[in-house]
Amino acid sequence: MCGIVGYIGAKNATPIVLNGLKRLEYRGYDSAGLAVLTNGHIEVRRDAGKLERLAALVEADPVKGKIGIGHTRWATHGEPSARNAHPHLSTDSDFVVVHNGIVENFLDLKEELTAEGAVFRSDTDTETIVHLVERYYSLEHDMTLAARRALKALKGAHGVVLMSSHEPDKIIAARIGNAGGVVIGYGDGEMFVASDIPAILEHTRRVSFLESGQMAVIRRTGVEVFTLDGQPVEPQIHTVAWDPIAAEKGEYRHFMQKEIHEQVRSLTDTLAGRVDLDEGRVRLPTLNLDEKTARKIQKIVITACGTASHAGMVGKVLIEHIARIPTELDIASEFRYRDPLVDENTVVLAISQSGETADTLAAMEEARKKGAVLWSIVNAIGSQAMRLASGCISMQCGPEIGVASTKAFTAPLVDLYLLAVLLGDLRGTLDEARRRKLVADLALVPDLAGRCLDRESEVAEVARSLKNTRDALYLGRGINMPIAYEGALKLKEISYIHAEAYPAGEMKHGPIALVDRNMPVISIAPLDPWYEKMISQVEQVKARGGVVVAVATEGDARVEGLADHIFWVPETPWLLSPVVTVIPLQMFAYHIAALRGLDVDQPRNLAKSVTVE
Ligand code: G6P
């Protein structure tokens, strides 16, 4: 949540910060602001609402300088207003801060600082940080030492970026706990800092990441990294392979639509280098898995939030069916507080697009304390979920900007399949013929996804006829039951239509009472082992006057005779079918939201990376 950007160099910081914020707006859009050091003092521009309001403000009242910081906010403490927008200034306006996280002891600190004479101008917890820095600067006369003392006084998890007119040659950045990443970008005579890579990708691909408990002093010419106790740390510089164009909308109206269409590419990249079709084998070197460890595993617990948890639900079916290892999906925010039963023979596998979701990271920490083996499937390179794990499968998606996750859902489905095959191979649960067949099927996936995308106009047509519906029910069974959950989530998060998902077999225990002429029932009924069961459920819905929208395999005459609308998908090996059945549901939600004129990429109340509890 909350996006942070900073720049120090020879250019004008204002457009660089504004552009960076634009790339991060998916992290929060309640308010936006920037601060620039100009002629020895700090100028702030900030406003409630989206970034375009800040851009208009800056255009009307321009500000220039060679060092600047900015912020886009997802409100926690204090309503989303201009006065609560970051950056926040100290009492004498010589220090300024942007922040991601929650200062848990802010009430105590505020009381102390107010008693000392600090003047608070907002309702935020963040403002305490800048007053603390001011307090310690008056004692230390050194920005780095003052920042260190201030940071040590904070409870909670934080990403912080600070600057001061007293020491205009530096920006200070810090990461404490899991409130989101802090990435430092290395340019030529200029440096960048941000909460996420896309913000700085157009300037540099050379980056390093702060670990929790580290603080960086960033100057034009480079960076020094310290622990909060002042011990120097050598930053590791990585080169990001992402193409800056990948973070642009291009010919598409919305990032979500672009990202739906990028799935052919992301699925192709997911297989590249990992599938050996000649040998009929899967290779996942970054998982660091050998036969001995594979044979030791007694249980796998997949933990994740939101869309990633739906991928985990599919993962349970895949791993249990292919590798015969008991596997559970545990929602991260539940797992972390339940004293879960995991030990050194358990693998806890976290799935996360951002790799920064607070609940997922906390679940990983909990698992680590209990001695479990930690793996992750993560998209954001260098993120905490990647670094915490002893083995990681990196999603090959490139940046995902739309708040509603799409390509970062189908990629981990394939990653989980790869994992299941690898485990099955290492544990000897797969004979050679079966293993070869499972691997050969993978090669079909990108093309099958492409064939779903080719039918976008048909899906858009159905969306047009159902765009005014108030509710929708999504049903699926077996491996496609999680797709009902994912389809319903897509619809509610971007179109604000109430949508419920159910395992189809549970219909008779309650939800069937909801069915009438006004209730579209989206029934996921491809040719998989649950097909017959799904058909009888569809019959029951029809018998009660429901409007059936079926996801069905091309050429299926039975479904054609039953359903009011059909999203056709190509025939697909059933273990891979969720990759294709979800695509029309992504497009359906997208078109309904776009037809209703809603902000598809930045739906109300949501944020892409949820770095608070
Ligand atoms: C937020 C996003 C969802 C995402 C979830 C988990 O709720 O809006 O799209 O699925 O977080 O995020 P992660 O980055 O851990 O996959």
Image (cartoon, rainbow, N blue to C red):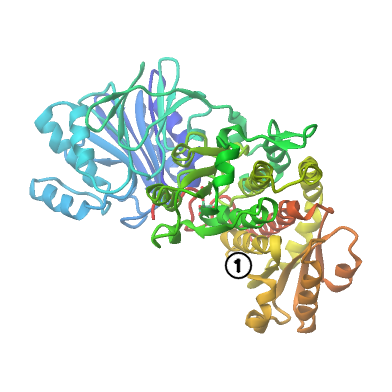
The image quarter containing residue 269 is top right
Horizontally, residue 590 falls left or right of residue 558, namely left
Residue 410, how many percent across, how many down? Answer: 66, 48
Question: Can residue 94 be seen here?
Answer: no
Horizontally, residue 586 falls left or right of residue 216, namely right
Q: Which residue is mark 1?
A: 497
Residue 306, how many percent across, how many down? Answer: 54, 56
The three-letter code of the residue at mark 1 reads Ile
Horizontally, residue 489 falls left or right of residue 436, namely left
Count neighbours of disc 1 (C-alpha within 10 A) and say few if under 14, some if 14 to 19, many if 20 or more. many
Q: How many marks?
A: 1
Please state which of residues 28 and 397 is positioned toward the viewer in this rendering: 397
Question: Can residue 445 be seen here?
Answer: yes
Q: Is residue 504 above or below residue 223?
A: below
Residue 388, how many percent across, how many down? Answer: 44, 40
What residue is at 73 percent from the left and 41 percent from the top?
A: 264
Disc 1 on helix, strand or loop? loop
